[in-house]
Amino acid sequence: MQIGEVAERTQLSLRTIRHYDQVGLAPPSARSEGGFRLYTEDDVERLHHIRRITPLGFSLEETAELLELIEHGGSEEAVIEFLERARTARQKLARKLRQADGLIKTLEHLSN
């Protein structure tokens, strides 16, 4: 499939998908004769993984390591380390969400 369909299916922008290609996180499986990026279902799945990893604040190198772990397995130690870091990052995001909810409530009271 071409990049437009991949963008629609992953809810990522064309620019973001191209960036992931350029940095080596999600290169397309092939290119057409005209040079257009061509993606497979596995490529789309990889982009879905990246979408889940990115909000947790992992670096590009760590994201590449996580993708390797998800797609090909790895040591239990590595899984546990990333799991703990993902849980900590999730807790931070949950705290920020609660703060945003509090602000929204305050603003809603002001608008009534």
Image: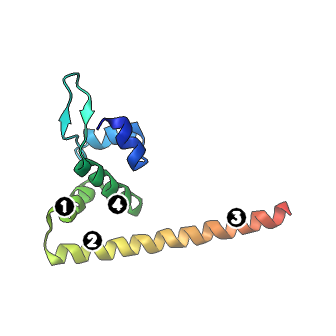
Lower position in the chain sequence, tag 2 or tag 4:
4
What residue is rendered at 41% in x and 59% in y? 55
- Is residue 25 positioned above or below 58 on the image? above
Q: Name the one closer to the observer, 46 or 25.
A: 46
Secondary element at tag 3: helix
Residue at mark 1 to residue at mark 3: CA–CA distance: 39 Å
What residue is rendered at 75% in x and 67% in y? 106
Residue at mark 1 to residue at mark 4: CA–CA distance: 13 Å
Residue at mark 4 to residue at mark 3: CA–CA distance: 27 Å
The residue beneath circle 3 is 104
Secondary element at tag 4: helix
Q: Name the one closer to the observer, 35 or 84.
A: 35
Q: Quadrant of the C terminus?
A: bottom right
The residue beneath circle 2 is 82
Lower position in the chain sequence, tag 1 or tag 3:
1
Lower position in the chain sequence, tag 1 or tag 4:
4
Residue 97: x %, y % from top left: 56, 68
What residue is rendered at 15% in x and 67% in y? 73
Lower position in the chain sequence, tag 4 or tag 3:
4
Q: Mark on residue 71?
A: 1
Q: Is residue 89 left or right of residue 66?
A: right
Lower position in the chain sequence, tag 1 or tag 2:
1
Residue 23 lies in what quarter of the image?
A: top left
Q: Between tags 1 and 4, which lies in front?
A: 1
Q: Quadrant of the N terminus?
A: top left
